[in-house]
Image (spheres, rainbow, N blue to C red):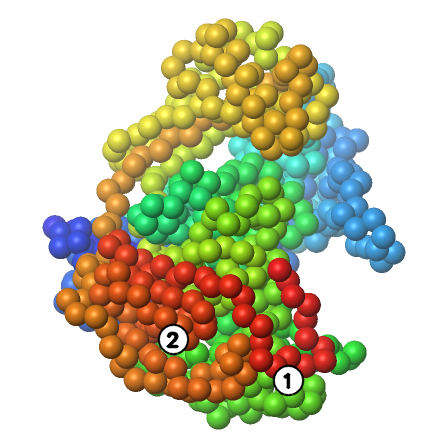
Amino acid sequence: MSRLIFGIDIGGTFTDVVGYDETTGQVHVAKVPSTPPRHAEGFIAGITRILDEHGYVTSDVKRVVHGTTVGTNAVLEHRGATLGILTTGGFEDVLTIGRMKRSDMYDLNADAEVPLFLAPRRRVRGIPERLTSKGEVLIPLDADAVRTAVTELVEREGAQSIVVCYLFSYLRPEHEEQTRTIIQELYPSLHVSISSEVDGKFREYERLVMTAFDAYIRPIIEDYLRALDTDLQAKQVAAPLQVMQSRGAISGSWVVVERPVATVLSGPAAGVIGGVDAARRSGFDDAVTIDIGGTSCDVALVRDAKPVITTEGKIERYPLRLPMIDVHTIGAGGGSIAWVDAAGGLKVGPRSAGSRPGPAAYGKGGTQATVTDASVVLGYLNPTGFAGGTMSLRTDLAEQAIREHVADPLGLDLPAAAAGVHRIVNSAMAQALRLVSVRRGHDPRRLVLVALGGAGPVHSARLAQAIGIPTVIVPPTPGVLSALGLLLADVEHEQSRTFRSVLTDAEPAALDAVFADLDATCEARMQREEAPNVAISHMAELRYVRQSYELEVALPAGALTPEALATAAQDFHKLHERVYGFALPASPVELVTLRTVHTAHLVKPTLLGGLRGASAPAEPVGTRSAYFEEIGAYEPVPIYARTSLKIDQEIQGPAILEQADTTTVVCPGQSIRLDENGNVLLTVGDMLQPAAAVGAREVADVS
């Protein structure tokens, strides 16, 4: 009987794999180097390690859950498919014009804030057709014009995917559907994305961008999933493959093939789900999660034990109108490269050494100074026990890189240079934490910081000090918590549709009819998933009349009544006051979008076996010379093994706590203890003043 569920998260440096045995409740962890561009190799290597080390066979695998950044990277690196775009005749410049916004009003060299890399103007064709704003056919679709345009785009421009986005098609999709049929008759293997299916809502620019991103990554996602499927079959793993969506839930890989854009921002979502679970188990409902890996740092706010969801996200500067966990990402991680600019200022990132060649300390040919090299020089990482003992770190190479690229150019000694690298990268990450908390009106003193990723617990103590968070939670397996979060996610399907009406004029029966149609689509998908325990949620996006932005409020899942709509209006006023600081109860409320979400709550793994704590207080397993700015010199610091901690035993800093997937650094004036839920709670003390400055170009205090 199949009993093993895998969660696999591919990062820029490592691929994290968690296997959960439903029969025994055991959780097995593996961390293997990522293998770009053939990510499937690391994917299979992690599965193989757990199967071989713990005596499983391939038939034991029940399902495989995957979080992917393939689509995200394709967009960020501008290496997606060659697109051709079909629009309503006369609206060929929607992508070029955009919203005429400039985020930086005083940048004289600002680039256009529209994704023109998706398709230059020469690959946009206007098709004679037109619907009215009420969905009535004004001009029938010209099928011959479609054939001519597509033939030109494919034969002359080399288009690999076609985007179809007609005006008001969200009201009546027949013209887009007919266009797709014509294209498939001409070129059966050509990829086609139509806006009425990808993003069936009003605002033509945002709808076009969403559909274009879908078509841009569609061939890459299909090839990637096909390679994974081939490798799994070669390994004789017949279990279904599920993929994390940007909203923080999972679905079958077939859904990704239908709508690839739904995974564009799915990479960081799994870590947030894991962080929510860790905070909740220790009794905290409000938190900030920070996931620090090899190349990036992902920060998200958690309120009332739920991640904050946004429907107006972005990728780079471009709108991505997709329900997603609100994650703020910066290019800062263990592999971030430290460098000195022409003015003599120390910079860290956003360039990363990645997994190949990686930091200099890896001994794989890397020569640039990285944050990981600084951590080695400071004595925070165990050179002989890194990544669970699977890797050794070269202290001599780390010192050489820091000395050559940081210390000598700045005239600093080696520890001061390494501490400076940490200060600058910590400053950038603290600003990201402040962005999702303080700048959104949340008092950091009422939050906890959940440290995720292989480098999260290394930096979390300093980050909590910087913005005033009193407690840091280090979960049992923070280095692979994104992979574990995949196993904690539920199956979910979402559908939405524009429905514009003043709320008091909306007919409940008309709204019920729309929800019935949306629910039918989600129900069919859940049946294909064979998912049990499905819960249905209905939502509406509301705004004041003549506003440009909406807020989402909940509606009852059953038949709507005038009283239910009146309650929704009251809820909107309260939410508007909380978000924007004011409400206008006398102003009419407009309904814009209806959304349904079907969620199948799966059985969650219990975290994690063997975490009840040791029977006797932990003793140091050794000491290591480490540098802390409060002390201003290297000194022997006690090293503790996490598995040796006794529940509620308090350990004072400075200290270092080691485990297979990460290292927790406890600064002077701080303390840690293991709680009964398996989490390590780090209590942040007052910020002590460094004994010596980092140097003349030291960054300003970010607090």
Residue type at mark 2 is Ala
Left or right, residue 537 beside residue 591: left
In this view of the protein, which residue sits in the foreground, 346 or 92? 346
Q: Give the x, y percent position of residue 79.
A: 61, 59
Judge whether residue 216 can be spotted in this image: no
Q: Is residue 539 visible?
A: yes
Q: Secondary structure under badge 2?
A: strand
Pointer 2: residues within 10 angstroms few (<14), some, or many (20+)? Answer: many
Vertical side of 420 occupied by 254: above or below: above
137 and 518: which one is in front? 518
Q: Which mark is residue 406?
A: 1
Decide: few, some or many residues near mark 1? Use Cα within 10 Å; few <14, some 14-19, many ≥20.
many
At a point 47% along the width and 24% down the height, the residue shown is 554
Image location (x, y in percent) of residue 558: 38, 15
Residue type for callout 1: Val
In the image, which disc is placed on residue 655?
2
Left or right side of 508 for 479: left
- Viewed as shown, does residue 560 lie left or right of 8? right
Q: Secondary structure at mark 1?
A: helix
